[in-house]
Amino acid sequence: MKRAYVEIQTDRIRPFQVDRELQTGRFPFQMHYRHAGDSGKKLLLLHMSGSSSDEFERAGDLLAERGFHVYAPDLPGFGMSDPPPCTPPSYLTMEEHAGMIAAFMDAVGIPAAYVYGNMATANLAVHLAVDFPKQVRGLMLAHPLYTHDAEQYARKRKLPEYSIVHPKNDGSHLITLWERSAKYGASADTADGRCLALHLAGIYGETLHWALFEDRGFSDCLEQITVPTIVVRYGGLGVLGLQREAAQKIKGSILDCYEEGTPYISREDPMAVVEMIGNYFGKDLPETENFIRNGT
């Protein structure tokens, strides 16, 4: 995939309460992104929390070969994008992240796109579709993080594993980052890539998780989706119930499964992602009501 930067304007985003001042209008913000292909259906790939667009480095080129025009931005504070206009413990909400993505789409000239989100960014993609429905043609939500108990979920915000990892003179903070990265049965190479992304994100590394945990209105958002939506669960996580319930809240949704997949599937098995996206976004989606497939 090729790499580029674009300066976005955030005048469509609700005001940010930042450390320096209340910013209500435009401010310059550089967003880094990867892209592949030059024609075909526009496809937006959103990396998981603590990652960057390099998550889709291999899948993006393969999707372009399938006829997609692919864009994969680094979210604010991740990869090589500028940090957001607020400093932890402040952070962007899911709605504000959605506004940033909509502004990115404006800046690079994407009137509407199919959107793929992974875990936390599956939830982000839902907000994008609800807040900016004209810019979303369809959604693929890879294991959206749905819960019955929003208050219990909010308490995760205080857990040690989601705290800021500060640099230490002896380098031991890198062990902590590795421990957060080496999970889901990941190979050393996969964990190394994820660890590097967390390291580069620095104090912003867990901010997307914080936004996720405080997103108390997510369940209501699912019911407001009006675009064709596929919910894909990770069979490697061994959990079905909540993804099924999330899919059932979305009118006309489809539930599918990466049978042995984990959240690192784009790094470890990019062809599985290419085939899943191609199977649905490569053709017109059917008009169905809660058609549940392969998740039973």
Image: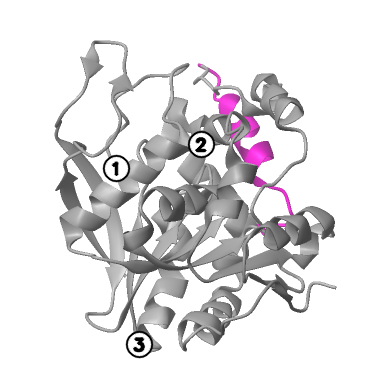
Query: Which residue is tagged 1?
Result: 81
Q: Residue at x 25, y 46 (%)?
A: 31
**Amino acid type, mark 3:** Gly
Q: Does residue 9 appear to the left or right of 148 in the view shown? A: left
**What distance separates the C-alpha of mark 3 from that of mark 1?**
27 Å
What is the quadrant of the N terminus in the image? bottom left
Residue 121 sits above or below residue 95 on the image: below
Point out the stretch of residues depicted in magenta. 169-187
Report the label total.
3
Residue 161 picture location, percent across and down: 68, 28
Residue 251 sits above or below residue 171 on the image: below
Crowd tier of the residue under label 2, counting other residues whose Cα lies within 10 Å: few below 14, some 14–19, many 20 or above = many
Disc 1 secondary structure class? loop
Q: Residue at x 61, y 73 (%)?
A: 269
Looking at this view, name the residue that lies furthest to the top.
20
**What distance separates the C-alpha of mark 1 from that of mark 2?**
14 Å
Disc 3 secondary structure class? loop
Between circles 3 and 1, the one closer to the viewer is 3
Q: Quadrant of residue 80?
A: top left
Disc 2 secondary structure class? helix
Residue 213 picture location, percent across and down: 62, 31
The numbered disc on residue 67 is 3
Proximity of marks 3 and 1: CB atoms separated by less than 8 Å: no
Query: Which residue is tagged 2?
Result: 208
**Amino acid type, mark 1:** Ser
